[in-house]
Amino acid sequence: MKAKTAFFYGPHDLRIEEVEVPSLKANQVLVKVGACGICGSDVECLEGNSKEGRYDLGPYTPGHEWGGQVAGIGSGVSSMKPGFKVSGDCVMQCGVCRNCQEGLMPSACMNMREAGFRPDSPGGMAEYMVIEEQYLHRVPDEWSFEDAGWVETFSIGYFGIWGNGGYIDASDIAVIIGAGPVGLSACMVARTSGAKTIVVDPVASRRERAKKYGAEHVIDPMDRLIQKIADCTEGRMGTVVVECSGNDTAIASLFDIGGHGARVRLIGHSIGRKIPVEIGKTIWRTLAITGAGGTKNFAQRTIRFMDRIRGTYDFAALNTHHFPLDKIHEAFEVATHDKEHAFKVMLNM
């Protein structure tokens, strides 16, 4: 069987090709992809601004925010059946290396694969994909494929707050930096906990959208950021500060935004850059700073969490643009250049 499949060959070199779908090994599942979101990391890989996409190893199929339906199973598969709606992990740890057996994060796996970023890993921007059973997660039948495509994104915001010893409750003041898809996911998590929730973003349309997804206060970081946070927290500042933007100025501001004893949660990617910060405030404010590169054992929790709040928050409305796979170049143009209006661009198969 042949299927239309997207490939990144290098910077600004995205192609659609018709390729033979490989035969299933015993532990593999054939998934008919229903929808796949375009992530900011996909855009950066296409533009040549990120080393996460490994087209230096060969062309690969992008797409890690996908939802689909099981179309076939290998002889050893026991948890999946044809017809199940599914989503999948992005970071694919082997489970047997020293670091995996020590319980470290999947990003520490010595044999790590990454869906949508490497030629040895599957990607969701295709009509069909083949993936090992252990990386799949069933979603409720009533969910759309686009809903399933949000699991990976939402899990990052969710784990960013709760993973690696994190927590939040109604006594907290949550300050979310960045109102992109991950930032709004963290915002929904914070507001569901009952925490006072503040979202910071320079784009007016994103601030307005944040109000619909849990933000009680929205702030433009270009307009007296520290003073405005102080004003709406009675000087306490944030007790949980979640950095989702990866922006240098935003990262430097964390040491002023975080109040005494704050838990600072770093999610936004800034790897490869050195950022001047006033690190001494970590001591005098007793800040606890934790990184979260990916997630660990959170997909099932994420699916249950999303299912519980779907009646409160309209996930479908977060998908602002829809394109068929054949128009993938147009889809990437919108995702790259229309930040004001394009929130989540979805490819529908």
Image (spheres, rainbow, N blue to C red):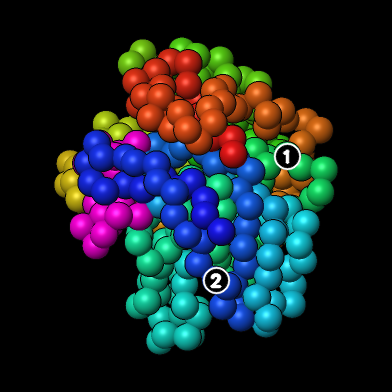
**Residue type, mark 2 in image:** Ser
* Secondary element type, mark 1: loop
Q: Is residue 31 above or below residue 39?
A: below
Q: Residues within 10 Å of mark 1 (few under 14, many from 20)?
A: some
In x, y percent, where is residue 124?
A: 51, 49
Q: Quadrant of the N terminus?
A: bottom right
Which one is nearer the viewer's eye here, 144 or 89?
Answer: 144
Q: What span is colored magenta in the figure?
A: 43-60
Relative placement, left or right, of 304 versus 1 is right
Q: Which mark is residue 179?
A: none
* Residue 180 seen anywhere in this rendered image of the structure: no
Q: Is residue 329 rendered magenta in the image?
A: no
In x, y percent, where is residue 151?
A: 62, 48
| Cα distance in 3D space between marks 1 and 2 | 27 Å
**Residue type, mark 1 in image:** Ser
Q: Quadrant of the C terminus?
A: top right
Q: Which residue is mark 2?
A: 23
Relative placement, left or right, of 15 versus 307 is left
Q: Which residue is mark 1?
A: 144
* Secondary element type, mark 2: loop
Q: Are marks 1 and 2 in contact (CB under 8 Å)?
A: no
Which one is nearer the viewer's eye here, 24 or 124?
Answer: 24
Residue that appears at 39% across and 37% down: 40
